[in-house]
Image: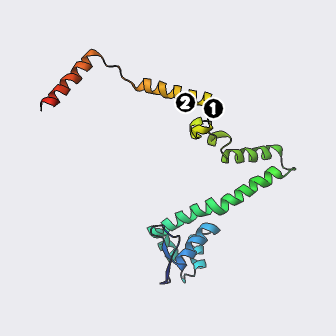
Amino acid sequence: MACSHKKPFAKGLAGSDLTSMQRTFVTTLVRHGCTPTQAAREAGYAEPKVPAHDQLRSAHIQTAVRFESSRYVMSDLANIATGTLRDVIEDKEAPASARVQAARTVLELAGELGRGKSDSYEDRPLSELSADELTRMIDRWTEEKAAMAKPINQDDQALASAVGMAQLAH
């Protein structure tokens, strides 16, 4: 069965104290893309089929699997993906369409193109804005303020006065 010695899977992650066998199970499952039974076998469980089933039903293990998956994608796989994009871009024998698509993907990830691109001058410090950009910003704010303003007609004004007087009387 599981080792009694527990170590944190990832410092600060709530519910992440796993035994070394559980850590091996989670890491193997996520990083090797194998079946839960194979991961349990690799972790050293004597009868891997039952522990694999039990592990995956545990909220504690499910949290660790989600965390490890996220960490793996954001670190190792992101580095591999970036390297692959670089290789395609630099490969002079790769089809031009593949090179262009890889370059486009890199520019999108860098926020220089497509959905990630921000043309908004509001994302920059005011000191970096031109006089024209500052003027457009002020004009837009003025328009937004005017759109929010509600004209007060005489009936509304009379009602507001009556309410105010009633509150003063109490």
Q: How is the image coloured?
A: rainbow
68 horizontally vs 167: left or right: right
Residue mark closest to the camera, 2 vs 1: 1
From the image, tell me which residue sits under label 2. 137
Amino acid type indicated by mark 2: Met
Residue 140: percent from left, percent from top: 52, 27
Residue 153: percent from left, percent from top: 30, 16
116 horizontally vs 146: left or right: right
Element under disc 1? loop
Asked whether 120 or 85 is in front, the reply is 120
Asked whether 38 or 143 is in front, the reply is 143
Rendering quarter of residue 157: top left
From the image, tell me which residue sits under label 1. 130
| Total tally of numbered discs in the picture | 2
Residue 34 lies, with reference to residue 141, above or below; the image says below
Disc with the residue nearer the chain's start (2 vs 1): 1
Question: Residue 58, can we see it?
Answer: no
Residue drawn at point x = 46 percent, y = 27 percent: 144
Residue 38: percent from left, percent from top: 60, 74
Residue 81 lies, with reference to residue 147, above or below; the image says below
163 horizontally vs 84: left or right: left
Residue 126: percent from left, percent from top: 57, 37
Residue 40 lies, with reference to residue 88, above or below; the image says below
Instruction: Specify the quadrant that holds the C terminus.
Output: top left
Residue drawn at point x = 21 percent, y = 22 percent: 161
Q: Residue furthest left?
A: 170
- Residue density around tag 2, few if under 14, some if 14–19, many if 20 or more, within 10 Å: some
Element under disc 2? helix
Task: Name the mark on residue 10.
Answer: none
Q: CA distance from mark 2 to mark 1?
A: 11 Å
